[in-house]
Image (cartoon, rainbow, N blue to C red):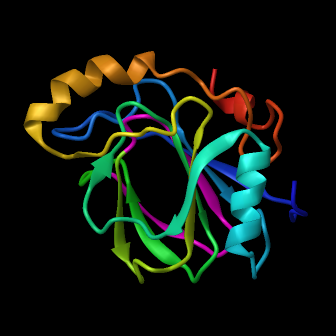
């Protein structure tokens, strides 16, 4: 695990809406200032891998509403603050700052609203969920996704600490 700053956690609950299912019971978890003001994306990626989260990448967030019905996802921001809408078109727009991470439960909609797509986002997925799907807010995907999402297994470890906490304080 790389050295981390003290961080706080915010929860965001977004109900199912017209075309983005979101998760029926798991909130988005926003960990604020996990890696301070100048995180190295490759060290963050290595940290996620050492905590059991694989399929990692460094890139950006798509500028269209989308979700993953077959996997949870962690995103870390190693670049400047960007605005991301979580939960689909009716969701909340959040300032996603440098050093922040967000745990997105399966079905959780997300979309870059303002900022550079090439902003230094690091992403990863829990063990066994690295072969993720990509769904847009399309009506034809909604019903199947509503059945798939509750079946997605909980991660076995927190992507930051490598143990069960603080993740299992919120996701049960």
Q: Position of residue 107 (x, y in %)?
A: 37, 36
Residue 33 in sight from this viewpoint: no
Which of 69 and 13 lies nearest the eye of the viewer? Answer: 69
On the picture, is 1 further left or further right than 55?
Answer: right
Q: How many marks?
A: 0
Please tell me whether residue 125 is drawn above or below residue 147 in the rendered image.
below
Vertical relation: 151 (above or below) 54: above
Residue at x 74%, y 29% (from the top left corner) = 169
| The one of 116 and 45 positioned closer to us in this rendering | 45
Q: Position of residue 121 (x, y in %)?
A: 54, 69
Q: Is residue 98 magenta?
A: yes
On screen, residue 172 versus residue 158, left or right, reads: left
Q: Which quadrant of the structure image shows residue 58?
A: bottom right
Q: Position of residue 29 (x, y in %)?
A: 60, 45
Instruction: Left or right? Give the position of 155 relative to 12.
Output: right
Farthest left residue in view: 140
In the rendered image of this protein, does residue 69 appear above or below residue 36?
Answer: above
Q: Position of residue 160 (x, y in %)?
A: 76, 49
Q: Quadrant of residue 17?
A: top left
- Residue at 9 percent across and 37 percent down: it is 139
Q: Residue at x 8, y 33 (%)?
A: 140
- In this orientation, does residue 75 appear? yes
Check the picture and name the quadrant holding the C terminus: top right
| Residue farthest to the right, as pictured | 3
Region rendered in magenta = 91-108
Seen in the picture, residue 142 relative to 30 is either above or below; the reply is above
Q: 31 left or right of 115?
A: right
Q: Residue at x 66, y 42 (%)?
A: 53
Q: Is residue 139 located in the magenta-colored stretch of the structure?
A: no
Could you say which is closer to the camera, residue 168 or residue 70?
A: 70
Nearer to the camera, 40 or 13: 40
């Amino acid at each position: 695990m790389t050295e981390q700053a003290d961080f706080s956690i915010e929860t965001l609950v977004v109900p199912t809406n017209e075309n983005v299912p979101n998760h029926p019971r798991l909130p988005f978890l926003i960990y604020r200032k996990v890696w301070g003001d100048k995180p190295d994306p490759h060290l963050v990626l290595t940290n996620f891998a050492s905590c059991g989260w694989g399929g990692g990448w460094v890139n950006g967030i798509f500028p269209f509403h989308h979700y993953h019905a077959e996997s949870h996802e962690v995103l870390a921001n190693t670049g400047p603050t960007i605005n991301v809408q979580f939960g689909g078109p009716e969701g909340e727009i959040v300032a996603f700052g440098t050093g922040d991470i967000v745990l997105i439960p399966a079905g959780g909609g997300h979309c870059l609203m303002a900022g550079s797509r090439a902003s230094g986002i690091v992403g990863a997925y829990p063990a066994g969920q690295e072969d993720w799907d990509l769904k847009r807010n399309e009506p034809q995907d909604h019903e199947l996704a509503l059945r798939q999402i509750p079946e997605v297994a909980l991660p076995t470890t927190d992507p930051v600490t490598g143990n069960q906490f603080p993740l299992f304080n919120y996701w049960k």
